[in-house]
Image (cartoon, rainbow, N blue to C red):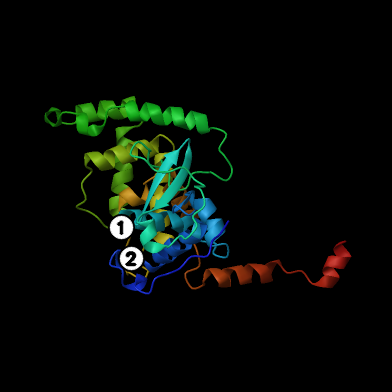
Amino acid sequence: MARIRTIKPEFPQSETMGKVSRDARLLFILLWTIADDLGRTRGASRMLASLLFPYDDDARDLIPAWLDELEDAAAIRRYVVDGDTYLEIRNWLKHQKIDKPSGPKCPGFDEGSPRPRESSPPDMDRDRDMDHDRDRDRSLSAAPTAAEVPRETGGQEVETLAADLGTNPDDVRRVFDHWRTEWGHPKAVLDDKRRKLIRLRLRDYAADDLCRAITGYRNSPHHTGQNDRATVFDDIGLLLRDAAHVDAGLRFADQPPRADQSALTRRNVAAVEDWVPPEDRLAAS
């Protein structure tokens, strides 16, 4: 159940909030209205989009990036309990004064809580293959990382490791080179962290799909710098951070938003295009 919350007058001057975009600040405030009296709520991106931005068609694709901003600024932390994603608002009692707190509605965070594998897990319509995904994640966590491969061997172990994880090292290089070219980073280096990230995504997506998702983000006004911070969000670690980000990039590729129309305008246009005169409706019935 949504709750009435308060905003302190000094909130706009918060240095922490000054580090995030205007959209992320709005999301942060809206999270207060659905958090329980301990500052916790469910953290699935799709659910948050439907509850907090019901009239904004693009919110589902943009919320993962806003959550990333808030987590990077230490305003929230996300965690997983029994396969479900939750988030906790840090310094909750500095933001809200709770006179008669009710009991917790969500499990709390502890140091042993894993981080979400995806920013937007399908909490609203549970994936039938959840158990399979958990087993796959456990197998991935047990696999050696590129950081464990001796550097003096000239990279042979890296190629062997990629083969062991079911990925083609040529695909890893192809995805990375595509990102460098598409986003103009000719001097970027394929280090161990980026190599591992691309390998993990290649377990679920073809190299062509990852390249298409990277290109798709060129259609995102937010990621190309049309935001209140005038900042381009184009790091490959963000674009391929998890399955939710890849899926968002693919949607941007397949259904690029109209740059000259707001979300409200696009909904109004769709409503007009779908409108059928009353006499036609009667004739059809």
From this viewpoint, which residue is outermost toward the left? 152
Q: Is residue 70 visible?
A: yes
**In the visual, does 230 lie left or right of 108?**
left
Graded by Cα atoms within 10 Å as few (under 14), some (14 to 19) or many (20 or more), the crowding at tag 2 reads some
Q: Is residue 221 visible?
A: no
Q: Quadrant of the N terminus?
A: bottom right
Query: Residue 73 has which mark?
Result: 1
Earlier-in-chain disc, 1 versus 2:
2
Disc 1 to disc 2: CB gap under 8 Å: yes
The kind of residue on which mark 2 rests is Met
Q: Which residue is mark 2?
A: 17
Q: Is residue 229 above or below residue 1?
A: below
**Where in the figure is residue 242, as x and y percent of width and height?**
40, 44
Graded by Cα atoms within 10 Å as few (under 14), some (14 to 19) or many (20 or more), the crowding at tag 1 reads some
Residue at image x 46%, y 44%?
85
**In the visual, does 284 lie left or right of 227?**
right
Q: Quadrant of the C terminus?
A: bottom right
Q: Secondary structure at mark 1?
A: loop
Residue at image x 35%, y 31%?
167
Image quadrant where residue 65 sits: bottom left
Give the total of numbered labels.
Answer: 2
The kind of residue on which mark 1 rests is Ala
**Where in the figure is residue 279, as x and y percent of width and height?**
85, 71
From this viewpoint, which residue is outermost toward the front? 100
**In the visual, does 55 lie left or right of 226?**
right
